[in-house]
Amino acid sequence: MYRIVESREIAPAVKLIRILAPEIARKAQPGQFVILRVDAMGERIPLTLADWNITEGTITLVFLEVGVSTRKLGELKEGDAILDLLGPLGNPTDVRNYGTVCIVGGGVGIAAAYPIARALKRARNKVISIIGARTAKLLIFEEEMRRCSDEVHISTDDGTKGYKGFVSDVLRKLLQEGYGFDMVYAVGPAVMMRAVAEVTRPYNIKTIASLNPIMVDGMGMCGACRVTVGGKTMFACVNGPEFDAHKVDFTELIRRQMAFIQEERMALELWEANKRGDE
Protein backbone atom coordinates (compact mmCIF):
# COMPACT_ATOMS: atom_id res chain seq x y z
CA MET A 1 0.00 0.00 0.00
CA TYR A 2 1.20 3.50 -0.86
CA ARG A 3 -0.04 6.38 1.28
CA ILE A 4 -1.27 9.64 -0.20
CA VAL A 5 0.22 12.64 1.60
CA GLU A 6 -1.54 15.31 -0.47
CA SER A 7 -4.59 15.41 -2.71
CA ARG A 8 -6.08 18.56 -4.23
CA GLU A 9 -7.90 19.85 -7.28
CA ILE A 10 -5.75 22.24 -9.32
CA ALA A 11 -8.33 22.83 -12.10
CA PRO A 12 -11.85 21.56 -12.79
CA ALA A 13 -11.63 17.72 -12.82
CA VAL A 14 -7.81 17.91 -12.69
CA LYS A 15 -6.26 16.44 -9.55
CA LEU A 16 -2.77 16.51 -8.08
CA ILE A 17 -1.71 13.82 -5.63
CA ARG A 18 1.56 13.24 -3.81
CA ILE A 19 2.29 9.67 -2.85
CA LEU A 20 4.84 8.35 -0.38
CA ALA A 21 7.06 6.16 -2.57
CA PRO A 22 10.71 6.68 -1.55
CA GLU A 23 12.20 3.98 -3.79
CA ILE A 24 10.54 5.44 -6.87
CA ALA A 25 11.40 9.02 -5.89
CA ARG A 26 15.05 8.07 -5.48
CA LYS A 27 15.30 6.67 -9.02
CA ALA A 28 12.87 8.92 -10.91
CA GLN A 29 14.03 10.86 -13.97
CA PRO A 30 12.31 13.29 -16.36
CA GLY A 31 10.04 11.65 -18.92
CA GLN A 32 9.38 8.52 -16.91
CA PHE A 33 6.03 7.21 -15.69
CA VAL A 34 4.45 4.89 -13.14
CA ILE A 35 1.63 2.38 -13.36
CA LEU A 36 -0.80 2.18 -10.46
CA ARG A 37 -3.86 0.29 -9.36
CA VAL A 38 -6.23 1.99 -6.95
CA ASP A 39 -7.71 -1.18 -5.46
CA ALA A 40 -8.05 -4.91 -6.06
CA MET A 41 -10.85 -4.37 -8.60
CA GLY A 42 -9.06 -1.58 -10.42
CA GLU A 43 -7.30 -1.54 -13.77
CA ARG A 44 -3.64 -0.65 -14.23
CA ILE A 45 -3.25 2.94 -15.43
CA PRO A 46 -0.05 4.76 -16.51
CA LEU A 47 0.63 8.29 -15.27
CA THR A 48 3.69 10.37 -16.10
CA LEU A 49 5.69 11.72 -13.18
CA ALA A 50 5.08 15.43 -12.67
CA ASP A 51 7.59 15.80 -9.83
CA TRP A 52 9.39 13.94 -7.07
CA ASN A 53 11.18 14.77 -3.83
CA ILE A 54 14.01 12.47 -2.74
CA THR A 55 14.24 14.01 0.74
CA GLU A 56 10.53 13.55 1.47
CA GLY A 57 10.34 10.30 -0.50
CA THR A 58 7.31 11.43 -2.50
CA ILE A 59 6.23 11.47 -6.13
CA THR A 60 3.67 13.84 -7.67
CA LEU A 61 1.07 12.79 -10.23
CA VAL A 62 -1.40 15.00 -12.10
CA PHE A 63 -4.38 13.53 -13.93
CA LEU A 64 -7.73 14.34 -15.47
CA GLU A 65 -10.76 12.51 -14.08
CA VAL A 66 -12.22 10.91 -17.21
CA GLY A 67 -12.97 7.24 -16.47
CA VAL A 68 -13.69 4.95 -13.55
CA SER A 69 -10.06 4.50 -12.49
CA THR A 70 -9.16 8.19 -12.51
CA ARG A 71 -12.45 9.07 -10.81
CA LYS A 72 -11.73 6.54 -8.05
CA LEU A 73 -8.18 7.87 -7.74
CA GLY A 74 -9.47 11.42 -7.52
CA GLU A 75 -11.78 10.52 -4.64
CA LEU A 76 -8.86 9.50 -2.42
CA LYS A 77 -7.86 11.95 0.29
CA GLU A 78 -4.75 12.61 2.35
CA GLY A 79 -4.08 9.55 4.47
CA ASP A 80 -5.75 7.13 2.05
CA ALA A 81 -3.66 4.60 0.15
CA ILE A 82 -3.51 3.02 -3.29
CA LEU A 83 -2.93 -0.70 -3.62
CA ASP A 84 -0.17 -1.02 -6.24
CA LEU A 85 2.44 1.33 -7.65
CA LEU A 86 5.12 0.32 -10.15
CA GLY A 87 7.96 2.52 -11.41
CA PRO A 88 9.76 4.45 -12.52
CA LEU A 89 9.13 3.00 -15.98
CA GLY A 90 10.13 4.02 -19.49
CA ASN A 91 13.29 5.58 -20.82
CA PRO A 92 14.15 8.96 -19.31
CA THR A 93 14.43 12.09 -21.43
CA ASP A 94 17.79 12.51 -23.15
CA VAL A 95 18.90 15.57 -21.21
CA ARG A 96 21.86 17.45 -22.64
CA ASN A 97 22.80 20.93 -23.81
CA TYR A 98 21.09 21.36 -27.17
CA GLY A 99 21.07 25.15 -27.25
CA THR A 100 17.55 26.56 -27.48
CA VAL A 101 14.74 24.15 -26.67
CA CYS A 102 11.01 24.66 -27.02
CA ILE A 103 8.77 22.78 -24.61
CA VAL A 104 5.15 22.50 -25.77
CA GLY A 105 2.63 21.28 -23.22
CA GLY A 106 -1.11 20.91 -23.59
CA GLY A 107 -3.74 20.18 -20.94
CA VAL A 108 -2.51 17.87 -18.17
CA GLY A 109 0.53 17.26 -20.37
CA ILE A 110 1.90 20.54 -19.01
CA ALA A 111 2.55 18.83 -15.68
CA ALA A 112 4.42 16.01 -17.43
CA ALA A 113 6.42 18.57 -19.44
CA TYR A 114 7.52 20.42 -16.30
CA PRO A 115 10.31 18.05 -15.12
CA ILE A 116 11.62 17.90 -18.70
CA ALA A 117 11.78 21.69 -18.92
CA ARG A 118 13.43 21.88 -15.50
CA ALA A 119 16.09 19.31 -16.39
CA LEU A 120 16.88 20.95 -19.73
CA LYS A 121 17.20 24.33 -18.03
CA ARG A 122 19.62 22.84 -15.51
CA ALA A 123 21.61 21.50 -18.48
CA ARG A 124 22.10 25.16 -19.50
CA ASN A 125 19.65 25.21 -22.39
CA LYS A 126 17.61 28.27 -23.22
CA VAL A 127 14.07 27.06 -22.57
CA ILE A 128 11.09 28.59 -24.36
CA SER A 129 7.84 27.07 -23.13
CA ILE A 130 4.43 27.11 -24.78
CA ILE A 131 1.55 25.92 -22.63
CA GLY A 132 -2.12 25.76 -23.49
CA ALA A 133 -5.56 24.58 -22.48
CA ARG A 134 -9.14 24.82 -23.68
CA THR A 135 -9.82 27.71 -21.32
CA ALA A 136 -7.98 29.72 -18.64
CA LYS A 137 -9.59 27.74 -15.80
CA LEU A 138 -7.96 24.55 -17.11
CA LEU A 139 -4.46 26.00 -17.42
CA ILE A 140 -2.14 24.30 -14.92
CA PHE A 141 1.49 24.52 -13.75
CA GLU A 142 1.99 28.04 -15.12
CA GLU A 143 4.15 29.18 -12.20
CA GLU A 144 6.17 25.96 -12.23
CA MET A 145 6.92 26.41 -15.93
CA ARG A 146 7.87 30.05 -15.44
CA ARG A 147 10.45 29.06 -12.83
CA CYS A 148 12.37 26.91 -15.31
CA SER A 149 11.78 28.79 -18.57
CA ASP A 150 13.38 31.83 -20.15
CA GLU A 151 10.03 32.62 -21.79
CA VAL A 152 6.53 31.25 -21.35
CA HIS A 153 3.87 31.69 -24.02
CA ILE A 154 0.25 30.85 -23.26
CA SER A 155 -2.64 29.90 -25.50
CA THR A 156 -6.26 29.02 -24.82
CA ASP A 157 -8.76 27.69 -27.32
CA ASP A 158 -11.33 30.31 -26.31
CA GLY A 159 -8.93 33.22 -25.82
CA THR A 160 -9.63 33.64 -22.10
CA LYS A 161 -5.88 33.85 -21.48
CA GLY A 162 -2.95 34.50 -23.78
CA TYR A 163 -3.16 33.77 -27.50
CA LYS A 164 -6.55 32.65 -28.81
CA GLY A 165 -5.83 29.36 -30.54
CA PHE A 166 -3.69 26.28 -30.11
CA VAL A 167 -0.15 25.77 -28.86
CA SER A 168 0.82 24.71 -32.37
CA ASP A 169 -0.37 28.12 -33.63
CA VAL A 170 1.91 29.84 -31.12
CA LEU A 171 4.82 27.65 -32.16
CA ARG A 172 4.23 28.50 -35.82
CA LYS A 173 4.06 32.20 -34.95
CA LEU A 174 7.37 32.08 -33.05
CA LEU A 175 9.10 30.28 -35.90
CA GLN A 176 7.77 32.83 -38.38
CA GLU A 177 9.10 35.60 -36.14
CA GLY A 178 12.58 34.10 -36.38
CA TYR A 179 12.91 32.00 -33.24
CA GLY A 180 15.52 29.32 -33.79
CA PHE A 181 14.93 26.06 -31.94
CA ASP A 182 17.47 23.26 -31.78
CA MET A 183 14.93 20.86 -30.29
CA VAL A 184 11.18 20.77 -29.64
CA TYR A 185 9.49 18.58 -27.02
CA ALA A 186 5.72 18.01 -27.20
CA VAL A 187 3.70 16.56 -24.33
CA GLY A 188 -0.08 16.41 -24.41
CA PRO A 189 -3.01 15.00 -26.41
CA ALA A 190 -2.03 13.04 -29.51
CA VAL A 191 -3.79 15.49 -31.84
CA MET A 192 -1.79 18.33 -30.30
CA MET A 193 1.52 16.52 -30.68
CA ARG A 194 0.68 15.66 -34.28
CA ALA A 195 -0.01 19.33 -34.98
CA VAL A 196 3.30 20.35 -33.39
CA ALA A 197 5.15 17.79 -35.51
CA GLU A 198 3.58 19.17 -38.69
CA VAL A 199 4.60 22.71 -37.74
CA THR A 200 8.25 21.78 -37.18
CA ARG A 201 8.57 19.36 -40.11
CA PRO A 202 9.18 22.02 -42.80
CA TYR A 203 11.87 23.56 -40.59
CA ASN A 204 13.57 20.20 -40.08
CA ILE A 205 13.67 20.75 -36.31
CA LYS A 206 14.10 17.58 -34.31
CA THR A 207 10.84 17.07 -32.44
CA ILE A 208 10.17 14.62 -29.64
CA ALA A 209 6.70 13.45 -28.62
CA SER A 210 5.86 11.69 -25.35
CA LEU A 211 3.31 9.06 -26.34
CA ASN A 212 0.45 7.88 -24.18
CA PRO A 213 -1.13 4.80 -25.79
CA ILE A 214 -3.24 2.19 -24.03
CA MET A 215 -0.90 0.42 -21.64
CA VAL A 216 -1.25 -2.62 -19.37
CA ASP A 217 1.88 -4.20 -17.91
CA GLY A 218 4.41 -1.45 -18.69
CA MET A 219 7.25 -3.91 -19.24
CA GLY A 220 6.94 -4.84 -22.92
CA MET A 221 5.25 -8.20 -22.39
CA CYS A 222 1.59 -7.55 -23.27
CA GLY A 223 2.05 -5.56 -26.46
CA ALA A 224 -0.94 -3.31 -25.73
CA CYS A 225 1.11 -0.11 -26.06
CA ARG A 226 2.44 -0.81 -29.53
CA VAL A 227 2.88 2.19 -31.79
CA THR A 228 4.27 2.54 -35.31
CA VAL A 229 7.36 4.71 -35.54
CA GLY A 230 9.22 5.01 -38.80
CA GLY A 231 7.24 2.09 -40.20
CA LYS A 232 8.31 -0.21 -37.35
CA THR A 233 6.28 -1.52 -34.44
CA MET A 234 7.56 -0.18 -31.13
CA PHE A 235 6.38 -0.56 -27.54
CA ALA A 236 5.89 2.79 -25.81
CA CYS A 237 6.64 1.34 -22.38
CA VAL A 238 10.11 -0.05 -23.09
CA ASN A 239 11.14 1.69 -26.33
CA GLY A 240 9.65 5.03 -25.28
CA PRO A 241 7.61 6.81 -24.16
CA GLU A 242 9.49 9.49 -26.15
CA PHE A 243 9.87 9.11 -29.92
CA ASP A 244 10.76 11.15 -32.98
CA ALA A 245 7.47 12.94 -33.61
CA HIS A 246 8.10 13.15 -37.35
CA LYS A 247 8.13 9.35 -37.57
CA VAL A 248 5.12 8.54 -35.37
CA ASP A 249 1.97 7.25 -37.04
CA PHE A 250 -0.38 9.52 -35.10
CA THR A 251 -3.45 8.42 -37.06
CA GLU A 252 -2.97 4.85 -35.86
CA LEU A 253 -2.17 6.02 -32.32
CA ILE A 254 -5.35 8.07 -32.07
CA ARG A 255 -7.45 5.24 -33.50
CA ARG A 256 -6.05 2.79 -30.94
CA GLN A 257 -6.62 5.26 -28.10
CA MET A 258 -10.29 5.39 -29.09
CA ALA A 259 -10.70 1.62 -29.42
CA PHE A 260 -12.46 1.09 -26.09
CA ILE A 261 -14.13 4.46 -25.62
CA GLN A 262 -17.64 2.96 -25.72
CA GLU A 263 -16.74 0.32 -23.11
CA GLU A 264 -15.10 3.00 -20.95
CA ARG A 265 -18.24 5.13 -21.12
CA MET A 266 -20.43 2.17 -20.19
CA ALA A 267 -18.15 1.28 -17.28
CA LEU A 268 -18.34 4.85 -15.97
CA GLU A 269 -22.13 4.93 -16.24
CA LEU A 270 -22.40 1.62 -14.38
CA TRP A 271 -19.99 2.80 -11.66
CA GLU A 272 -21.92 6.05 -11.19
CA ALA A 273 -25.21 4.14 -11.06
CA ASN A 274 -23.81 1.79 -8.40
CA LYS A 275 -22.60 4.76 -6.38
CA ARG A 276 -26.04 6.35 -6.46
CA GLY A 277 -27.50 3.03 -5.30
CA ASP A 278 -25.07 2.91 -2.37
CA GLU A 279 -26.16 6.37 -1.30
Image (cartoon, rainbow, N blue to C red):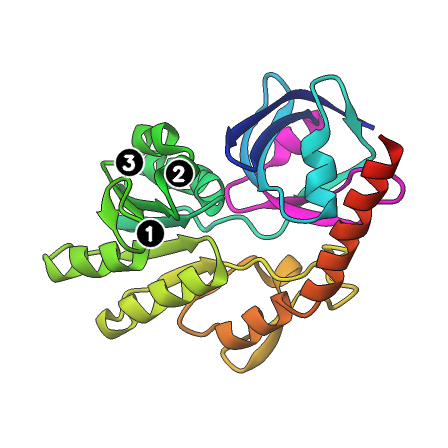
Residue at screen point 29% across, 49% down: 101
Where in the figure is residue 95, as x and y percent of width and height? 42, 46
Of the image marks 3 and 1, the number of the one nearer the N terminus: 3
Identify the residue position indicated by label 2 in the image.
139
Which amino acid type is marked by label 1? Asp
Q: Is residue 138 left or right of residue 276?
A: left
**Could you give the CA–CA distance between mark 2 and mark 1, rounded to whole angstroms?**
11 Å
Magenta region, residue range: 21-48
Kindly tell me whether residue 35 is visible in this rendering.
no
Instruction: Say few, some or many: other residues with alpha carbon within 10 Å of mark 1 (under 14 / 14 to 19 / 20 or more).
Output: some
Kindly tell me whether residue 188 is visible in this rendering.
yes
Q: Residue furthest bottom?
A: 231
Instruction: Say few, some or many: other residues with alpha carbon within 10 Å of mark 2 (under 14 / 14 to 19 / 20 or more).
Output: many
Q: Provide the secondary structure element on which disc 3 rests.
A: loop
Q: Residue furthest left?
A: 177
Residue at screen point 27% across, 46% down: 159
Of 243 and 275, the residue lying toward us: 275
